[in-house]
Image: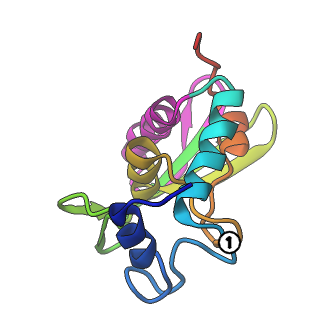
Amino acid sequence: MKESPQLKIAEANMRPGVITLNGFLGHDTRPLGDILVADEGTVRRMGLTHVSIAEKMRHFLDAGMTGLGEFVDVEPHFEVMVQSVRGKLPCPFGDPGLIPKTNVTVVNRSNGKQITYTEFHIHLVGQHGFYEGHGSPFRLEPKLLQEVLEIEPLDL
């Protein structure tokens, strides 16, 4: 995939030391456009959209806000903890504003799986279809998000 100048700038912003210490790409050597296309294919094969995934992630963030850093029960069988982390980050894709670094941990008691993501991830997934590169310490796998958060396929 031929990368646009905007994608090249975003990819440069994702390198270690630019926005975050470790960057967003891990050991993934593919161009950013190829990473985005591969994750788009995965999400479509699951019958989802990036927006539907981000909406479910946001649902658990909102539900867990009442816990003030402690786990709270969320029906039907989830535990959610939201922890506020000092600071905000700029979007590597150049979106205006800064995004809080709020951490969200969701435990699915039904299947025993859990995942931790950030408010920053919700933005990256929903607005850009970006889950981070392979080998990134904060990479989110779309399939694991679907399994833990129980995101139902859409009629696409």
Q: Residue at x 63, y 62 (%)?
A: 139
Measured as percent of width and height from the top left, residue 145 is found at 65, 42
Asked which colour scheme the image uses, the reply is rainbow
Q: Quadrant of residue 126?
A: top left
Quick check: 119 above or below 110?
below
Measured as percent of width and height from the top left, residue 18 is found at 39, 85
Quick check: 48 above or below 89?
above
Q: Which residue is mark 1?
A: 28
Residue 107 in the magenta stretch? The answer is: no
Quick check: 46 above or below 153?
below
Return the residue found at the far left.
Answer: 97
Q: For this view, does 51 lie left or right of residue 40? A: left
Front residue (pair 54, 80)? 54
Magenta stretch, main secondary structure, is helix
Instruction: Please give the range of residues in magenta.
Output: 49-78
For mark 1, give the secondary structure. Answer: loop
Q: Residue at x 37, y 80 (%)?
A: 19
Q: Residue at x 62, y 65 (%)?
A: 133
Quarter containing the C terminus = top right
Return the residue found at the far top.
Answer: 155
Front residue (pair 22, 156)? 156
Quick check: 27 above or below 80?
below
Front residue (pair 133, 32)? 32
Q: Quadrant of residue 43?
A: top right
